Image: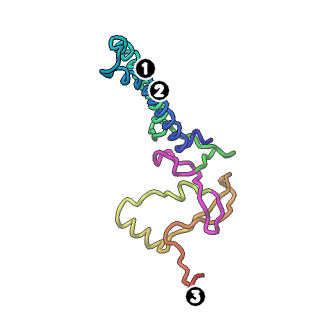
Amino acid sequence: MWLESFVGRLIIIGVTVVTGLTAGLLGFYPAVANTSTNQSKAPAATVYSMNEGIALATGLTAGMLGFCPTFANTMPNQSQTLVYPTNEYGQTYGPEALATSPETRPDLILARGVDGTEGYVLNEDLNPELPKTPEEGLAQERKYPNGRTIPLYAVDGKTIIGKFHIGKPKVEIFYEPIK
């Protein structure tokens, strides 16, 4: 829903701030106009000015009370944990970009295969344990000099529907100009 998107929340913030400021300033403007020296009702203007000052403070407070919680909901919060959907085998699935830390990544990460098929890769395939020593890192690099290919799964995490390549991209050489 657009209200839950970042842009939707920015729109809500803008409308709330403008409404609060408008309410406050509409109430404040007559007070400024009535306090000028060429007004014949100077004592009444003081009382009117105080009432309008209260209206300004009320409008600004209402605007900020609406603004702050809305703004707070647009900011990423580490304490809010995302609940990924779960497949029939109990594996979570979804985009890795929504995870707030490596520990909160889903079991099946949304990916696009080498042929354009959309599916999921296993988190442990995509993010294996890092080498502990430089020698292990070099051995891993030698083992996969052109990157590696892992299976692309359907949402069930069992059915292989394609391949996902990690590493150096495939380069195609064109001998004719591209039109």
Q: Are marks 3 and 1 in contact (CB under 8 Å)?
A: no
N-terminal-most mark, 1 or 2: 2
Residue 24 horizontal/vertical position (percent) = 43, 25
Eyeballing the image, is 60 above or below 165? above
Residue 49 placement (x, y as % from top left): 37, 17
Q: Residue at x 45, y 56 (%)?
A: 129
Q: CA distance from mark 3 to mark 1?
A: 72 Å
Q: How many marks?
A: 3
The residue singled out by tag 3 in the image is 176
Q: CA distance from mark 2 to mark 3?
A: 66 Å
Residue 178 falls in image quadrant: bottom right
Q: Secondary structure at mark 2?
A: helix
Residue linked to disc 2 = 23
Helix, strand or loop for disc 3: loop
Number of the label disc, if any, that sits on residue 55: 1
Q: Nearer the viewer, mark 3 or mark 1?
A: 1
Was residue 69 drawn as part of the magenta stretch in this picture? no
Look at 43% across and 70% down and name the residue there. Answer: 141
Q: Seen from this angle, which residue lies furthest left?
A: 37
Residue 113: say if magenta: yes
Q: Which range of residues does the magenta coloring cover?
A: 95-119
Q: List x then y, in percent, for residue 174.
A: 56, 84
Disc marking residue 30: none
